[in-house]
Amino acid sequence: MNVYKDKKGFFSIFDGILAILIVIVALMIFNTFINIDISQYSKANDDFLTSQDVMEIMALKANENTYSTFEIICSNLENNNNSLRSIEEISIISGEFLNNTIGDKSYSLVENNQLNGTVIASNDNMFSAKNISVATRNIGKYSFTLYIW
C-alpha cells in the first residue's frame, strides 16, 4: 500500500491537525481573557475595608497578657474622668497607631458617646474629602468612629 495514494490517511491526519489547531486557538483566547485587567468599580471599597480592618486591629489584643489599643484608650479616659489631659494622651497614642497602620491615607478618629464628637486623632481636613469610609466600634461606654478618605 502506497502512503501517497492512501486518501483516508491524509484526511484523518488533516482532521487531527485541525482539531489540535482549534484547541490551541481556544486556549489562546481563554488565556487572553484571563489576563485582561478588570479594574475595580471604586477605590471607596478598599477604604471601607481598610477602615473596618483598622478598627478591628485596634480592638484586638496581641495576646492574653496585653491590652488592646482601645482598652488602653478607654481606661485612660475612665481613670482621668475624660479630662483634657487624658484626651491629649490618647490623641498621641491613637495618632501614632493610625499613622503606622494606615500609611498615606487621611483619617480622623472621633469619640461620639462620652466626649460628644471630640476628634481624638486626625491628619487632614475631612471637609475637603470626596469619598469617606466609616467604621464604628463601641467599647464599654465609648463609641469610636474612624473616617478614612
Image (cartoon, rainbow, N blue to C red):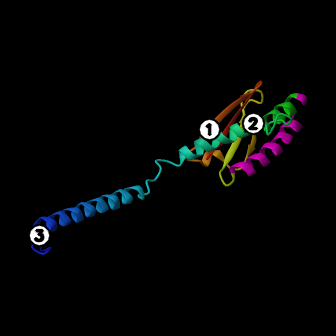
Q: Which residue is mark 2?
A: 60
The one nearer the camera, 95 or 81, is: 95
Q: Quick one: label 3 or label 2, which is nearer the N terminus?
A: 3
SS for tag 1? Answer: strand
Residue 95 falls left or right of residue 85: left
Between discs 1 and 3, the one toward the N terminus:
3
Label 3 residue SS:
loop
Q: Main secondary structure of the magenta part?
A: helix
Q: What is the three-letter code of the residue carrying label 2?
A: Leu
Crowd around label 3: few <14 · some 14–19 · many ≥20 (10 Å): few
In this view, the mark in front (1 or 2): 2
Q: Residues within 10 Å of mark 2 (few under 14, many from 20)?
A: some
Residue 104's mark?
none
Q: Nearer the viewer, mark 3 or mark 2?
A: 3
- Which numbered disc, 1 or 2, marks the residue that appears first in the sequence? 2
Dot 3 amino acid type: Asp
Q: Position of residue 135 (x, y in %)?
A: 64, 36
Circle number at residue 134: 1
Dot 1 surroundings within 10 Å: few (below 14), some, or many (20 or more)? many
How far is disc 1 from disc 2 in space, using C-alphas?
A: 19 Å
- Indicate whether residue 97 is drawn in magenta: yes
Observer-nearest of 135 and 126: 135
Q: Is residue 114 left or right of residue 5?
A: right
Residue drawn at (43%, 53%), measured in percent from left and top? 38
In which image quadrant can residue 121 be found? top right
Q: Nearer the viewer, residue 12 or 102?
A: 12
Q: Which residues are magenta?
A: 79-102
Q: At label 1, which amino acid type do we have? A: Val
Distance (Cα) linking label 1 and label 3: 76 Å
Q: Which residue is mark 3?
A: 6
Q: Which quarter of the figure is the N terminus placed in?
A: bottom left
